[in-house]
Amino acid sequence: MLFVDREEELEALKLEYELCRKDVRCGVLVYGWRRVGKTSLVKHFLENMGGGIYINCAWLSNTKSLASKVRESIARFDETLSNIFWGRILFIDDPEHILYEALETIDSLAKKTKKAKLIVVLDEFHVFLENVAKKIARIKRENINTVKERVFWFLKDLLERKNAFWILLSSIGWEKLEELMSLRKGAKQPLLAALRRILVRPLDMRASAELAMKIREGIPLDAAKTIAEISGGIPPIVITLASSYDGSSVIRLAYRLVEKREFDDFFINIIKLISELSRRDLPAYIQVLLALARDIKSPVEISRSTGLDETAVSEILRELIKNEILTKRREKGRVLYEFRYPLMKFWLKTSEEFLHEATKKDVSSLLGISAESYIRELLAETIDKEITIWDDKLGTFLAGTAKELKLKITRILSRKETEKALREIKNADIIAEETNRVLIIEVKATTKPITRDTITKLAEIIRQYPTKKRKQGILIQLGTGEITPPAVAEAIKNNIIIITREGIQLIAKKINFPEP
Protein backbone atom coordinates (compact mmCIF):
# COMPACT_ATOMS: atom_id res chain seq x y z
CA MET A 1 0.00 0.00 0.00
CA LEU A 2 1.47 3.37 -1.08
CA PHE A 3 1.43 5.81 1.80
CA VAL A 4 2.69 9.41 1.88
CA ASP A 5 2.45 12.47 4.10
CA ARG A 6 0.09 11.22 6.82
CA GLU A 7 2.54 11.31 9.72
CA GLU A 8 0.58 13.98 11.59
CA GLU A 9 -2.72 12.06 11.34
CA LEU A 10 -1.01 8.76 12.27
CA GLU A 11 0.51 10.37 15.34
CA ALA A 12 -2.90 11.75 16.33
CA LEU A 13 -4.41 8.25 16.08
CA LYS A 14 -1.55 6.74 18.11
CA LEU A 15 -1.94 9.42 20.78
CA GLU A 16 -5.68 8.75 21.02
CA TYR A 17 -5.05 5.02 21.22
CA GLU A 18 -2.66 5.54 24.14
CA LEU A 19 -5.26 7.71 25.87
CA CYS A 20 -7.76 4.89 25.40
CA ARG A 21 -5.32 2.40 26.94
CA LYS A 22 -5.24 4.71 29.96
CA ASP A 23 -9.07 4.82 29.97
CA VAL A 24 -9.18 8.55 29.22
CA ARG A 25 -11.13 8.57 25.91
CA CYS A 26 -11.84 5.78 23.40
CA GLY A 27 -13.46 7.37 20.36
CA VAL A 28 -12.15 9.12 17.25
CA LEU A 29 -13.99 10.66 14.31
CA VAL A 30 -11.87 10.74 11.13
CA TYR A 31 -13.49 12.91 8.46
CA GLY A 32 -12.66 14.79 5.27
CA TRP A 33 -13.31 14.93 1.54
CA ARG A 34 -14.23 11.73 -0.22
CA ARG A 35 -11.20 9.78 -1.53
CA VAL A 36 -8.55 11.89 0.25
CA GLY A 37 -7.10 8.78 1.89
CA LYS A 38 -9.03 8.36 5.17
CA THR A 39 -9.54 4.62 4.70
CA SER A 40 -5.90 4.10 3.66
CA LEU A 41 -4.79 6.05 6.73
CA VAL A 42 -6.87 3.97 9.13
CA LYS A 43 -5.96 0.65 7.49
CA HIS A 44 -2.27 1.64 7.73
CA PHE A 45 -2.82 2.41 11.41
CA LEU A 46 -4.55 -0.96 11.93
CA GLU A 47 -1.69 -2.77 10.22
CA ASN A 48 0.89 -1.00 12.39
CA MET A 49 -1.08 -1.83 15.54
CA GLY A 50 -1.48 -5.52 14.75
CA GLY A 51 -4.99 -5.47 13.31
CA GLY A 52 -8.53 -5.12 14.59
CA ILE A 53 -12.05 -5.02 13.18
CA TYR A 54 -12.77 -3.01 10.03
CA ILE A 55 -16.34 -2.76 8.67
CA ASN A 56 -17.28 -0.69 5.61
CA CYS A 57 -20.80 0.49 6.44
CA ALA A 58 -21.37 2.25 3.10
CA TRP A 59 -22.63 -0.95 1.49
CA LEU A 60 -24.78 -2.15 4.40
CA SER A 61 -28.48 -1.63 3.73
CA ASN A 62 -29.86 -2.82 7.10
CA THR A 63 -28.87 -3.97 10.58
CA LYS A 64 -29.03 -7.65 9.56
CA SER A 65 -26.25 -7.04 7.02
CA LEU A 66 -24.24 -5.28 9.76
CA ALA A 67 -24.78 -8.29 12.01
CA SER A 68 -23.47 -10.57 9.25
CA LYS A 69 -20.28 -8.48 8.95
CA VAL A 70 -19.87 -8.45 12.73
CA ARG A 71 -20.23 -12.24 12.78
CA GLU A 72 -17.45 -12.61 10.16
CA SER A 73 -15.16 -10.15 11.97
CA ILE A 74 -15.61 -11.71 15.40
CA ALA A 75 -15.01 -15.24 14.07
CA ARG A 76 -11.35 -14.32 13.39
CA PHE A 77 -10.90 -13.73 17.12
CA ASP A 78 -13.45 -15.99 18.80
CA GLU A 79 -15.47 -18.46 16.72
CA THR A 80 -17.55 -19.60 19.70
CA LEU A 81 -18.68 -16.04 20.47
CA SER A 82 -19.42 -15.52 16.77
CA ASN A 83 -21.69 -18.60 16.64
CA ILE A 84 -23.50 -17.68 19.87
CA PHE A 85 -24.09 -14.15 18.56
CA TRP A 86 -25.49 -15.37 15.22
CA GLY A 87 -27.73 -17.87 16.99
CA ARG A 88 -29.31 -14.95 18.90
CA ILE A 89 -29.65 -12.76 15.80
CA LEU A 90 -31.65 -15.42 13.93
CA PHE A 91 -34.47 -15.02 16.46
CA ILE A 92 -34.55 -11.19 16.51
CA ASP A 93 -36.81 -9.24 14.13
CA ASP A 94 -36.48 -5.74 15.63
CA PRO A 95 -33.78 -3.92 13.54
CA GLU A 96 -32.89 -1.61 16.43
CA HIS A 97 -32.39 -4.60 18.76
CA ILE A 98 -30.15 -6.24 16.09
CA LEU A 99 -28.02 -3.05 15.90
CA TYR A 100 -27.50 -2.95 19.65
CA GLU A 101 -26.84 -6.69 19.83
CA ALA A 102 -24.17 -6.47 17.11
CA LEU A 103 -22.29 -3.61 18.77
CA GLU A 104 -22.68 -5.11 22.26
CA THR A 105 -21.09 -8.33 20.97
CA ILE A 106 -18.08 -6.40 19.64
CA ASP A 107 -17.82 -4.79 23.08
CA SER A 108 -17.98 -8.26 24.71
CA LEU A 109 -15.11 -9.42 22.49
CA ALA A 110 -13.14 -6.29 23.44
CA LYS A 111 -13.52 -7.10 27.15
CA LYS A 112 -11.74 -10.41 26.53
CA THR A 113 -8.78 -8.71 24.85
CA LYS A 114 -6.29 -8.47 27.71
CA LYS A 115 -3.01 -7.28 26.17
CA ALA A 116 -4.28 -4.30 24.18
CA LYS A 117 -7.43 -2.42 23.33
CA LEU A 118 -9.36 -3.90 20.41
CA ILE A 119 -9.51 -1.38 17.54
CA VAL A 120 -12.91 -1.16 15.82
CA VAL A 121 -13.34 0.86 12.62
CA LEU A 122 -16.77 1.75 11.18
CA ASP A 123 -16.20 3.33 7.76
CA GLU A 124 -18.89 5.73 6.40
CA PHE A 125 -20.85 5.17 9.61
CA HIS A 126 -23.02 8.27 9.04
CA VAL A 127 -24.57 6.84 5.84
CA PHE A 128 -25.47 3.59 7.61
CA LEU A 129 -26.89 5.31 10.70
CA GLU A 130 -28.99 7.70 8.61
CA ASN A 131 -30.48 4.87 6.53
CA VAL A 132 -31.03 2.59 9.52
CA ALA A 133 -32.66 5.35 11.59
CA LYS A 134 -35.11 6.02 8.73
CA LYS A 135 -36.04 2.34 8.49
CA ILE A 136 -36.48 1.93 12.26
CA ALA A 137 -38.58 5.11 12.41
CA ARG A 138 -40.78 3.85 9.58
CA ILE A 139 -41.28 0.39 11.11
CA LYS A 140 -41.96 1.74 14.61
CA ARG A 141 -43.91 4.78 13.36
CA GLU A 142 -41.66 7.16 15.26
CA ASN A 143 -39.97 10.44 14.44
CA ILE A 144 -36.50 9.79 12.98
CA ASN A 145 -34.87 12.12 15.53
CA THR A 146 -36.35 10.08 18.38
CA VAL A 147 -34.67 6.98 16.92
CA LYS A 148 -31.39 8.83 16.31
CA GLU A 149 -31.35 10.09 19.87
CA ARG A 150 -31.60 6.54 21.27
CA VAL A 151 -28.89 5.26 18.92
CA PHE A 152 -26.52 8.17 19.67
CA TRP A 153 -26.91 7.74 23.44
CA PHE A 154 -26.28 4.01 23.06
CA LEU A 155 -23.09 4.69 21.06
CA LYS A 156 -21.94 7.25 23.62
CA ASP A 157 -22.44 4.68 26.39
CA LEU A 158 -20.47 2.14 24.35
CA LEU A 159 -17.55 4.57 23.92
CA GLU A 160 -17.56 5.50 27.60
CA ARG A 161 -17.19 1.84 28.67
CA LYS A 162 -13.67 2.13 27.17
CA ASN A 163 -13.38 -1.56 26.33
CA ALA A 164 -12.51 -0.92 22.66
CA PHE A 165 -10.90 1.88 20.66
CA TRP A 166 -13.61 3.07 18.22
CA ILE A 167 -12.74 4.87 14.97
CA LEU A 168 -15.67 6.30 13.00
CA LEU A 169 -15.01 7.48 9.41
CA SER A 170 -17.08 9.98 7.43
CA SER A 171 -16.69 11.43 3.92
CA ILE A 172 -18.71 14.59 4.40
CA GLY A 173 -17.87 18.07 5.63
CA TRP A 174 -18.10 18.90 9.32
CA GLU A 175 -21.02 21.30 8.87
CA LYS A 176 -23.09 18.64 7.07
CA LEU A 177 -22.06 15.98 9.58
CA GLU A 178 -23.22 18.15 12.48
CA GLU A 179 -26.51 18.72 10.69
CA LEU A 180 -27.09 14.99 10.08
CA MET A 181 -26.32 14.17 13.68
CA SER A 182 -28.38 16.99 15.15
CA LEU A 183 -31.57 16.14 17.03
CA ARG A 184 -34.68 18.12 17.85
CA LYS A 185 -34.17 21.79 18.67
CA GLY A 186 -32.56 22.27 22.06
CA ALA A 187 -31.71 18.57 22.49
CA LYS A 188 -28.16 17.71 23.47
CA GLN A 189 -26.10 15.84 20.86
CA PRO A 190 -24.53 13.07 22.94
CA LEU A 191 -22.11 11.39 20.53
CA LEU A 192 -19.95 14.11 18.97
CA ALA A 193 -18.70 15.37 22.33
CA ALA A 194 -17.35 11.88 23.09
CA LEU A 195 -15.20 11.80 19.95
CA ARG A 196 -11.86 13.42 19.14
CA ARG A 197 -12.06 14.88 15.64
CA ILE A 198 -9.25 14.23 13.15
CA LEU A 199 -9.59 16.05 9.81
CA VAL A 200 -7.86 14.41 6.84
CA ARG A 201 -7.15 17.05 4.22
CA PRO A 202 -6.08 16.50 0.59
CA LEU A 203 -2.34 15.96 0.14
CA ASP A 204 -0.30 19.14 -0.10
CA MET A 205 1.70 19.98 -3.24
CA ARG A 206 4.90 18.35 -1.97
CA ALA A 207 3.22 15.11 -0.94
CA SER A 208 1.17 14.92 -4.14
CA ALA A 209 4.31 15.33 -6.26
CA GLU A 210 6.08 12.72 -4.10
CA LEU A 211 3.21 10.27 -4.68
CA ALA A 212 3.31 10.92 -8.44
CA MET A 213 7.04 10.15 -8.53
CA LYS A 214 6.51 6.94 -6.57
CA ILE A 215 3.84 5.85 -9.04
CA ARG A 216 5.90 6.72 -12.14
CA GLU A 217 9.64 6.39 -11.68
CA GLY A 218 11.63 8.90 -13.67
CA ILE A 219 8.81 11.41 -14.04
CA PRO A 220 10.27 14.95 -14.18
CA LEU A 221 9.76 17.05 -11.06
CA ASP A 222 7.95 19.78 -13.05
CA ALA A 223 5.48 17.23 -14.44
CA ALA A 224 4.94 15.79 -10.94
CA LYS A 225 4.21 19.29 -9.63
CA THR A 226 1.69 19.93 -12.42
CA ILE A 227 -0.02 16.63 -11.60
CA ALA A 228 -0.12 17.73 -7.96
CA GLU A 229 -1.73 21.03 -8.90
CA ILE A 230 -4.34 19.53 -11.28
CA SER A 231 -5.24 16.70 -8.87
CA GLY A 232 -6.09 19.00 -5.98
CA GLY A 233 -4.23 16.57 -3.71
CA ILE A 234 -6.73 13.72 -4.24
CA PRO A 235 -4.67 10.49 -4.25
CA PRO A 236 -6.76 8.52 -6.83
CA ILE A 237 -6.48 11.42 -9.30
CA VAL A 238 -2.73 11.70 -8.68
CA ILE A 239 -2.36 7.95 -9.27
CA THR A 240 -4.44 7.98 -12.49
CA LEU A 241 -2.53 10.95 -13.94
CA ALA A 242 0.91 9.68 -12.93
CA SER A 243 0.36 6.10 -14.11
CA SER A 244 -0.85 7.42 -17.52
CA TYR A 245 2.00 9.95 -17.93
CA ASP A 246 3.76 9.43 -21.28
CA GLY A 247 6.14 12.37 -21.36
CA SER A 248 3.72 14.76 -23.07
CA SER A 249 1.90 17.76 -21.58
CA VAL A 250 0.21 16.91 -18.25
CA ILE A 251 -2.62 19.31 -19.02
CA ARG A 252 -3.28 17.60 -22.36
CA LEU A 253 -3.09 14.25 -20.57
CA ALA A 254 -5.66 15.36 -17.97
CA TYR A 255 -8.06 16.57 -20.68
CA ARG A 256 -7.58 13.35 -22.62
CA LEU A 257 -8.33 11.20 -19.56
CA VAL A 258 -11.45 13.22 -18.75
CA GLU A 259 -12.68 12.80 -22.33
CA LYS A 260 -11.99 9.04 -22.09
CA ARG A 261 -14.31 8.99 -19.02
CA GLU A 262 -11.54 7.94 -16.63
CA PHE A 263 -12.90 10.09 -13.79
CA ASP A 264 -16.64 9.40 -14.21
CA ASP A 265 -16.96 7.01 -11.25
CA PHE A 266 -15.00 9.32 -8.96
CA PHE A 267 -17.08 12.45 -9.56
CA ILE A 268 -20.54 10.91 -10.08
CA ASN A 269 -20.21 8.95 -6.81
CA ILE A 270 -19.47 12.18 -4.93
CA ILE A 271 -22.62 13.81 -6.36
CA LYS A 272 -24.70 10.69 -5.65
CA LEU A 273 -23.55 10.62 -2.03
CA ILE A 274 -24.61 14.24 -1.49
CA SER A 275 -27.99 13.75 -3.17
CA GLU A 276 -28.68 10.66 -1.04
CA LEU A 277 -28.03 12.66 2.14
CA SER A 278 -30.34 15.51 1.13
CA ARG A 279 -33.97 15.92 0.10
CA ARG A 280 -33.07 16.80 -3.49
CA ASP A 281 -32.45 14.12 -6.07
CA LEU A 282 -29.49 13.44 -8.33
CA PRO A 283 -30.74 15.15 -11.53
CA ALA A 284 -31.30 18.43 -9.68
CA TYR A 285 -27.71 18.43 -8.35
CA ILE A 286 -26.37 17.61 -11.81
CA GLN A 287 -28.30 20.48 -13.41
CA VAL A 288 -26.98 23.01 -10.88
CA LEU A 289 -23.39 21.77 -11.22
CA LEU A 290 -23.59 21.86 -15.02
CA ALA A 291 -24.84 25.45 -14.83
CA LEU A 292 -21.92 26.41 -12.57
CA ALA A 293 -19.48 24.70 -14.95
CA ARG A 294 -20.89 26.92 -17.72
CA ASP A 295 -20.10 29.96 -15.52
CA ILE A 296 -23.75 30.67 -14.70
CA LYS A 297 -23.15 32.10 -11.25
CA SER A 298 -26.15 33.41 -9.30
CA PRO A 299 -29.11 31.35 -7.97
CA VAL A 300 -31.48 33.48 -10.10
CA GLU A 301 -29.48 32.81 -13.29
CA ILE A 302 -29.17 29.10 -12.46
CA SER A 303 -32.92 28.91 -11.84
CA ARG A 304 -33.65 30.47 -15.24
CA SER A 305 -31.16 28.18 -16.98
CA THR A 306 -32.30 24.91 -15.39
CA GLY A 307 -36.00 25.48 -14.78
CA LEU A 308 -35.51 24.61 -11.10
CA ASP A 309 -37.20 27.01 -8.70
CA GLU A 310 -34.91 29.49 -6.98
CA THR A 311 -35.52 28.02 -3.51
CA ALA A 312 -34.39 24.58 -4.71
CA VAL A 313 -31.26 26.05 -6.35
CA SER A 314 -30.30 27.94 -3.16
CA GLU A 315 -30.80 24.79 -1.09
CA ILE A 316 -28.63 22.73 -3.47
CA LEU A 317 -25.85 25.35 -3.42
CA ARG A 318 -25.92 25.33 0.40
CA GLU A 319 -25.65 21.52 0.41
CA LEU A 320 -22.69 21.61 -2.01
CA ILE A 321 -20.91 24.11 0.25
CA LYS A 322 -21.66 22.09 3.42
CA ASN A 323 -20.26 19.02 1.69
CA GLU A 324 -17.18 21.01 0.64
CA ILE A 325 -17.68 20.61 -3.11
CA LEU A 326 -17.96 24.37 -3.62
CA THR A 327 -16.49 27.43 -1.95
CA LYS A 328 -18.35 30.72 -1.75
CA ARG A 329 -16.93 34.22 -1.78
CA ARG A 330 -18.27 37.74 -2.29
CA GLU A 331 -16.81 40.01 -4.93
CA LYS A 332 -18.17 43.49 -5.68
CA GLY A 333 -21.54 42.67 -4.17
CA ARG A 334 -21.89 39.35 -6.01
CA VAL A 335 -21.70 35.87 -4.55
CA LEU A 336 -19.34 33.66 -6.56
CA TYR A 337 -19.05 29.86 -6.32
CA GLU A 338 -15.91 27.92 -7.17
CA PHE A 339 -15.16 24.20 -7.37
CA ARG A 340 -12.84 22.76 -4.74
CA TYR A 341 -11.81 19.89 -7.03
CA PRO A 342 -9.78 21.54 -9.85
CA LEU A 343 -10.74 18.90 -12.45
CA MET A 344 -14.44 18.85 -11.64
CA LYS A 345 -15.40 21.87 -13.73
CA PHE A 346 -13.78 20.50 -16.87
CA TRP A 347 -15.25 17.04 -16.19
CA LEU A 348 -18.74 18.54 -15.99
CA LYS A 349 -18.26 20.53 -19.19
CA THR A 350 -17.28 17.42 -21.14
CA SER A 351 -19.79 15.07 -19.49
CA GLU A 352 -23.23 16.55 -20.20
CA GLU A 353 -24.31 13.66 -22.46
CA PHE A 354 -23.02 11.06 -19.98
CA LEU A 355 -24.76 12.81 -17.07
CA HIS A 356 -28.07 13.06 -18.89
CA GLU A 357 -27.86 9.34 -19.64
CA ALA A 358 -27.10 8.64 -15.97
CA THR A 359 -30.20 10.53 -14.84
CA LYS A 360 -32.43 8.76 -17.37
CA LYS A 361 -31.82 5.52 -15.45
CA ASP A 362 -34.01 7.02 -12.72
CA VAL A 363 -37.50 5.89 -13.78
CA SER A 364 -39.09 9.12 -12.63
CA SER A 365 -36.33 11.69 -12.82
CA LEU A 366 -37.41 15.29 -12.98
CA LEU A 367 -36.56 15.42 -16.69
CA GLY A 368 -37.64 11.91 -16.92
CA ILE A 369 -39.73 9.30 -18.18
CA SER A 370 -43.49 9.37 -17.93
CA ALA A 371 -44.11 9.85 -14.26
CA GLU A 372 -47.76 9.01 -14.85
CA SER A 373 -46.82 5.61 -16.32
CA TYR A 374 -44.62 4.87 -13.33
CA ILE A 375 -47.37 5.74 -10.83
CA ARG A 376 -49.96 3.78 -12.82
CA GLU A 377 -47.71 0.68 -12.71
CA LEU A 378 -46.92 1.20 -9.02
CA LEU A 379 -50.58 1.51 -8.03
CA ALA A 380 -51.50 -1.52 -10.15
CA GLU A 381 -49.13 -3.53 -7.94
CA THR A 382 -51.08 -2.44 -4.84
CA ILE A 383 -54.47 -3.74 -6.05
CA ASP A 384 -56.22 -5.78 -3.31
CA LYS A 385 -53.42 -4.93 -0.86
CA GLU A 386 -53.82 -2.58 2.09
CA ILE A 387 -51.06 0.02 2.15
CA THR A 388 -50.69 2.59 4.94
CA ILE A 389 -48.13 5.37 5.11
CA TRP A 390 -47.73 7.78 8.01
CA ASP A 391 -46.42 11.30 7.73
CA ASP A 392 -43.84 12.69 10.16
CA LYS A 393 -43.58 16.15 11.75
CA LEU A 394 -41.47 17.39 8.85
CA GLY A 395 -44.06 16.42 6.24
CA THR A 396 -41.56 14.09 4.62
CA PHE A 397 -44.10 11.71 3.07
CA LEU A 398 -47.44 13.56 2.86
CA ALA A 399 -46.23 17.20 2.91
CA GLY A 400 -48.17 17.82 6.13
CA THR A 401 -51.53 17.40 4.36
CA ALA A 402 -52.59 14.29 6.36
CA LYS A 403 -51.36 12.23 9.29
CA GLU A 404 -51.80 9.00 7.37
CA LEU A 405 -52.93 7.64 4.02
CA LYS A 406 -54.59 4.24 3.66
CA LEU A 407 -54.91 2.72 0.21
CA LYS A 408 -56.95 -0.37 -0.67
CA ILE A 409 -57.35 -0.09 -4.42
CA THR A 410 -59.63 -2.58 -6.17
CA ARG A 411 -59.38 -1.23 -9.74
CA ILE A 412 -57.52 1.35 -11.81
CA LEU A 413 -59.31 2.81 -14.81
CA SER A 414 -57.47 2.43 -18.10
CA ARG A 415 -56.38 5.59 -19.90
CA LYS A 416 -59.37 5.29 -22.26
CA GLU A 417 -61.78 4.80 -19.36
CA THR A 418 -60.23 7.78 -17.57
CA GLU A 419 -60.58 9.96 -20.65
CA LYS A 420 -64.22 8.90 -21.06
CA ALA A 421 -65.04 9.46 -17.37
CA LEU A 422 -63.53 12.94 -17.51
CA ARG A 423 -65.12 13.95 -20.80
CA GLU A 424 -65.98 17.66 -20.76
CA ILE A 425 -63.94 18.01 -17.56
CA LYS A 426 -60.29 19.03 -17.38
CA ASN A 427 -58.21 15.86 -17.41
CA ALA A 428 -56.67 14.16 -14.38
CA ASP A 429 -53.97 11.51 -14.78
CA ILE A 430 -55.28 8.45 -12.94
CA ILE A 431 -58.64 7.34 -11.54
CA ALA A 432 -58.48 4.48 -9.02
CA GLU A 433 -61.41 2.84 -7.29
CA GLU A 434 -61.71 1.48 -3.76
CA THR A 435 -64.78 -0.18 -2.24
CA ASN A 436 -66.25 3.05 -0.85
CA ARG A 437 -64.36 5.84 -2.58
CA VAL A 438 -62.75 7.04 -5.82
CA LEU A 439 -59.19 8.37 -5.93
CA ILE A 440 -58.65 11.19 -8.42
CA ILE A 441 -54.91 11.46 -8.90
CA GLU A 442 -52.78 14.16 -10.52
CA VAL A 443 -49.09 13.30 -11.09
CA LYS A 444 -46.41 15.99 -11.28
CA ALA A 445 -42.71 15.54 -12.05
CA THR A 446 -41.82 19.19 -12.19
CA THR A 447 -38.89 21.32 -11.15
CA LYS A 448 -41.27 24.26 -10.66
CA PRO A 449 -43.03 24.92 -7.35
CA ILE A 450 -46.35 23.27 -6.56
CA THR A 451 -48.54 26.32 -5.96
CA ARG A 452 -52.01 27.03 -4.60
CA ASP A 453 -53.22 27.33 -8.20
CA THR A 454 -52.13 23.72 -8.90
CA ILE A 455 -54.29 22.49 -6.01
CA THR A 456 -57.25 24.72 -6.92
CA LYS A 457 -57.36 23.25 -10.45
CA LEU A 458 -57.31 19.69 -9.07
CA ALA A 459 -60.05 20.57 -6.55
CA GLU A 460 -62.26 21.77 -9.43
CA ILE A 461 -61.72 18.49 -11.33
CA ILE A 462 -62.66 16.53 -8.19
CA ARG A 463 -65.78 18.63 -7.67
CA GLN A 464 -67.01 17.97 -11.22
CA TYR A 465 -66.18 14.25 -11.33
CA PRO A 466 -69.48 12.28 -11.55
CA THR A 467 -69.70 9.53 -8.89
CA LYS A 468 -71.90 8.54 -5.96
CA LYS A 469 -68.89 7.31 -4.03
CA ARG A 470 -66.81 9.46 -1.69
CA LYS A 471 -64.09 11.32 -3.60
CA GLN A 472 -60.45 11.66 -2.52
CA GLY A 473 -58.05 13.92 -4.38
CA ILE A 474 -54.36 13.05 -4.45
CA LEU A 475 -51.50 15.08 -5.91
CA ILE A 476 -48.20 13.26 -6.35
CA GLN A 477 -44.99 15.28 -6.73
CA LEU A 478 -42.12 13.21 -8.13
CA GLY A 479 -40.04 16.22 -9.16
CA THR A 480 -37.83 18.56 -7.17
CA GLY A 481 -40.06 21.62 -7.20
CA GLU A 482 -40.93 22.96 -3.77
CA ILE A 483 -44.39 22.22 -2.36
CA THR A 484 -45.23 25.73 -1.19
CA PRO A 485 -47.01 26.46 2.14
CA PRO A 486 -50.03 28.03 0.32
CA ALA A 487 -50.34 24.80 -1.72
CA VAL A 488 -50.34 22.74 1.49
CA ALA A 489 -52.97 25.03 3.07
CA GLU A 490 -55.18 24.80 -0.04
CA ALA A 491 -54.81 21.01 -0.12
CA ILE A 492 -55.89 20.69 3.52
CA LYS A 493 -58.84 23.01 2.87
CA ASN A 494 -60.00 20.84 -0.07
CA ASN A 495 -59.20 17.46 1.56
CA ILE A 496 -56.50 16.74 -1.04
CA ILE A 497 -53.52 14.66 0.05
CA ILE A 498 -50.11 15.49 -1.42
CA ILE A 499 -47.71 12.54 -1.68
CA THR A 500 -44.06 13.53 -1.95
CA ARG A 501 -41.34 11.66 -3.81
CA GLU A 502 -40.27 10.17 -0.46
CA GLY A 503 -43.84 9.03 0.12
CA ILE A 504 -43.89 7.22 -3.23
CA GLN A 505 -40.51 5.65 -2.43
CA LEU A 506 -42.01 4.39 0.82
CA ILE A 507 -44.97 2.80 -0.98
CA ALA A 508 -42.56 1.22 -3.49
CA LYS A 509 -40.48 -0.25 -0.65
CA LYS A 510 -43.57 -1.69 1.02
CA ILE A 511 -44.49 -3.69 -2.10
CA ASN A 512 -40.91 -4.38 -3.27
CA PHE A 513 -41.33 -2.26 -6.43
CA PRO A 514 -38.47 -0.31 -8.12
CA GLU A 515 -38.13 3.06 -6.37
CA PRO A 516 -38.36 6.36 -8.27
Image (tube, helix red, strand yellow):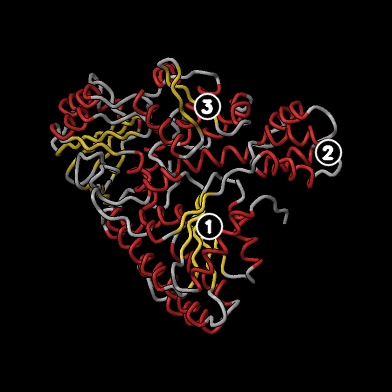
Q: Is residue 95 visible?
A: no
Picture quarter with the N terminus: bottom right
Q: Which residue is mark 2?
A: 219
Image height check: is 235 above or below 473?
A: below
Where is residue 83 drawn, in percent x and y?
Answer: 52, 81
Residue 204 location, quadrant: top right
Would you name the residue on which mark 3 appears?
338
- The residue under label 3 is which amino acid type? Glu
Pointer 1: what residue?
Answer: 123
Residue at image point 73% right, 53% down = 2
Q: CA distance from mark 3 to mark 2?
A: 31 Å
Number of dots carrying numbers? 3
Give the CA separation, mark 3 to mark 1. 29 Å
Quarter containing the C terminus: top left
Q: Classify mark 2: helix, strand or loop.
A: loop
Give amino acid for label 2. Ile
Along the horizontal axis of the image, is 492 left or right of 161? left
Of the residues tagged 3 and 1, which is closer to the observer? 3
Q: CA distance from mark 1 to mark 2?
A: 34 Å
From the image, state whether disc 1 or disc 2 is nearer to you: 2
Question: Which image quadrant for residue 243?
Answer: top right
Q: Categorize mark 1 by other alpha carbons within 10 Å: few (<14), some (14-19), many (20+).
A: many
**Mark closer to the chain start, 3 or 2:** 2
